[in-house]
Amino acid sequence: MELEKLQQFFNTKVSEAKVQFERTIDCKHTEFDNLYPYMSEQPQFFWYKRYVAWQELLTIITLADELGIEWKAAFLEKQVGYIEDKVLDAKVLDNWYEQIESEEHSERTN
């Protein structure tokens, strides 16, 4: 029972971190903007908040791994690879949604 609660807790935390990271990719408002409202005028702020969201995601996933909690089901295979590589670069930002977009495109053409 406790393992089930722990799994549910981490599923929620992974989901929240994923949404937060994806909002930074899309340049949408996040909780981080509320912490530093005076920084939003700075162009480098968007990169900084992406790295903060990425680190939050990696931290939660590292804890899940250490506890033996499954987290990969919340991500596409390519996204799991990016997370396991732990490096946030332009490739991750440019291709994070790639598989989703190609699946949506194939659904529209069928």
Image (cartoon, helix red, strand yellow):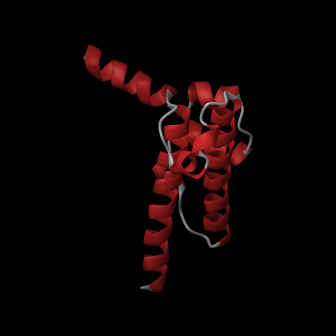
Q: Determine whether, in the image, residue 60 is placed left or right of residue 1.
A: right
As displayed, is residue 78 above or below residue 2? above
Q: Determine whether, in the image, residue 73 is placed left or right of residue 82.
A: left
Q: Residue 25 at x, y = what percent?
A: 55, 33
Query: Foreground residue, 93 or 81?
Result: 93
Q: Where's the C terminus, which quadrant? A: top left
Q: Residue furthest top?
A: 109
Q: Determine whether, in the image, residue 101 is placed left or right of residue 81.
A: left
Q: Residue 4 at x, y = what percent?
A: 43, 77
Q: In the figure, residue 58 lies in which quadrant?
A: bottom right
**One can see residue 81 in this view:** no
Query: Foreground residue, 106 or 101?
Result: 101
As displayed, is residue 105 above or below residue 86? above
**One can see residue 52 in this view:** yes
Q: Residue at x 60, y 66 (%)?
A: 64
Q: In the figure, residue 33 lies in which quadrant?
A: top right
